[in-house]
Amino acid sequence: MHHLRSHPRLAGLAAALLACLLTVAVLAARSRPGGRCAAAPPIPVLPAQLRALGDFDQPYDATVPRSLGSAALQAASALHPDLAAATSLGAPVEIAALDPARHDAIVFPLGTNPGPDGAPRSIAGLAVFLRSCGDQAYFSTVDDLAAAPPPAFPGVSRDRAARLLGPGAQPELVYVTTPLQPSWRDRRTGASVPAA
């Protein structure tokens, strides 16, 4: 310590280095996937149909969308036989939880009525997985929309949300109580518009 006091430049350099290390540590903690490693894993309470199939009470690797997608289709057809025709799987939709006590979600749209390009023109259901620490995801639920299928999920695109939120908006998909009812929120201002 005496050595640092006698060399003010060395003391200043040490202080700057310490400040840089603290900044890097804070940024690394904030950028962790999910950012909710203090929360308990979202282990599901499974209906009998999924308990009989097995594996749905175990975490899936969130970095392997094919595995999650297969589980989404399997769960949908087991829980809602009318969704067995929903063979088209949309791209996974990431939705951040605004409440730190909740988990971020990965939602798979289950499509029907494919168009000429093969993309679904109707969303018959939504399969939801909740993200735990790191790259783990747990099955959560399947929502059957076959009675009144919307054309897309989310119903409002990111581009449209950006126009609605105003110039320079940076929309992110978030939810408060359920990922089945997300909103687009401007990262800068906190203003939001429904995504449905």
Image (cartoon, grey):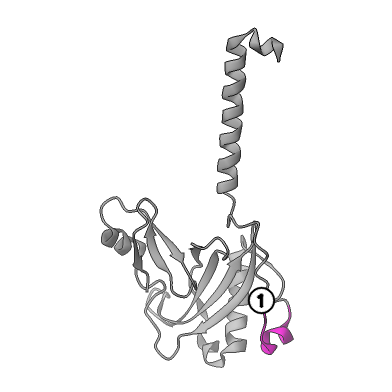
Is 19 magenta? The answer is no
Give residue 106's position: percent from left, percent from top.
Answer: 54, 67
Secondary structure under tag 1 reads: loop
Residue drawn at x 62%, y 20% as measured from the top left: 14
Q: What residue range appears in magenta? A: 45-54
Q: How many marks?
A: 1
Where is residue 77? Give x, y as percent: 59, 87
Seen from the viewer's position, the closer of residues 120 and 15 is 15
Prevailing secondary structure of the magenta residues: helix
In x, y percent, where is residue 139?
63, 74
Badge 1 is on which residue?
Answer: 44
**Amino acid residing under circle 1:** Pro
Can you tell which quarter of the image residue 9 is in?
top right
Above or below residue 79? Residue 187 is: above
Q: Is residue 20 left or right of residue 121?
A: right
Residue 50: in magenta span = yes
Which residue is nearer to you in this view: 60 or 64?
Answer: 60
Q: Quadrant of residue 122?
A: bottom left
Residue at (56, 90) in percent of width and height? 80
Residue in view at x 58 percent, y 64 percent:
101
Q: Position of residue 187 (x, y in %)?
A: 39, 53
Say whether residue 160 is left or right of residue 1.
left
